[in-house]
């Protein structure tokens, strides 16, 4: 009898709020528990997702993942249009990279993503292609030399510190533009264009920002 009452109390105290929690809030509670942010990696202290400042040209973008496609076009033999799941089916890589901003501050994050080289290989970049232009859902654009992306093994990130990119951080994909200033880290990317226009200038580059954007410490 005592046991039975104990179980009943345990059930009421633990399980029921849990169940109602699920029913009222969808599965988001459970996801966020399973996806607690990592704050240290191999002894290195990481920055937090909350350390970022949002100053995108049109504010955070809400991308509907059901209709989202990542297009790969321009100087390629095979243009492509991938769903989110198709992009994530590529081999996955993680690395700790610091993002430095023109304003002089930085954040170090454990990024997880797919290698841009794998995406280019699947579309077979043409020999004349020397520039990669990133287009985003908010109309933002930026570019990098193809060689830089390949030499630095740049990734297209879908997670940061073990958590799926939040909308304000560029969900579904942000370019991890290692050693390049913040404005090269395109968020909400929906099109990757291979080009032979090495002088292409993106949104901030047209407005006077240096096209190399090298971070020098
Ligand atoms: N799509 C898109 N990507 C963007 C921007 C933007 O306005 N739109 N701003 C850039 C600039 S200027 C910076 S400093 C970084 C900021 O990234 P964060 O908000 O993730 O720190 O995003 C870059 N990527
Ligand atoms: Mo910026």
Image (tube, rainbow, N blue to C red):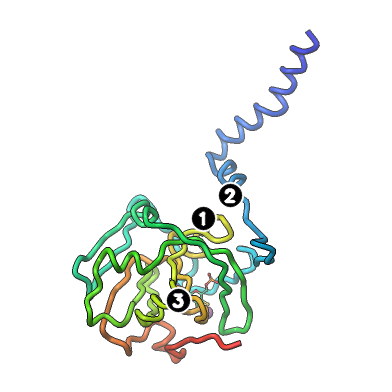
- How far apart are the two marked residues, 3 and 2, measured between alpha carbons? 28 Å
Q: Secondary structure at mark 1?
A: strand
Of badges 3 and 2, nearer the viewer stands 3
Q: Which residue lies at the image location 65% right of the left edge and 66% below the top edge? A: 46
Quadrant in the picture for residue 137 = bottom left
Q: Disc 3 marks which residue?
A: 152
Residue neighbourhood size for the residue with mark 2, other residues' Cα within 10 Å, grouped as few (<14), some (14–19), many (≥20): few
Of badges 1 and 3, nearer the viewer stands 3
- How far apart are the two marked residues, 2 and 1, measured between alpha carbons? 8 Å
Labels 2 and 1 touching (C-beta < 8 A): yes
Residue in front for this viewpoint, 165 or 140: 165
Question: Which numbered marker is on residue 6?
Answer: none
- How far apart are the two marked residues, 1 and 3, measured between alpha carbons? 23 Å
Image quarter hosting the N terminus = top right
Residue in front for this viewpoint, 162 or 33: 162
Residue in front for this viewpoint, 210 or 93: 93
Q: Disc 1 marks which residue?
A: 164
Q: Secondary structure at mark 3?
A: loop
Image quarter hosting the C terminus = bottom right
């Amino acid at each position: 009898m005592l046991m039975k009452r104990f179980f009943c109390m345990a059930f009421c105290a633990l399980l029921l709020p849990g169940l109602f929690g699920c029913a009222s809030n969808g599965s988001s509670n459970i996801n966020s528990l399973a996806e607690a942010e990592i704050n240290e990696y191999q002894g290195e202290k990481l920055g937090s997702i909350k350390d970022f400042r949002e100053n995108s040209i049109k504010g955070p973008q809400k991308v509907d993942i059901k209709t989202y496609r990542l297009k790969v076009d321009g100087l390629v033999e095979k243009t492509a249009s991938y769903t989110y799941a198709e992009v994530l089916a590529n081999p996955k890589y993680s690395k700790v990279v610091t993002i430095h901003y023109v304003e002089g501050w930085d954040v170090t994050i454990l990024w997880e993503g797919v290698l841009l080289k794998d995406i280019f290989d699947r579309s077979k970049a043409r020999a004349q292609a020397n520039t990669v232009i990133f287009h985003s859902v908010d109309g933002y654009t930026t570019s990098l030399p193809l060689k830089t992306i390949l030499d630095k093994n740049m990734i297209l990130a879908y997670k940061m510190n073990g958590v799926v990119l939040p909308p304000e951080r560029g969900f579904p994909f942000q370019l991890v533009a290692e050693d390049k200033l913040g404005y090269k880290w395109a968020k909400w990317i929906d099109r990757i264009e291979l080009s032979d226009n090495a002088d292409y200038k993106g949104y901030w580059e047209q407005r006077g920002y240096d096209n190399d954007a090298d971070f020098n410490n």
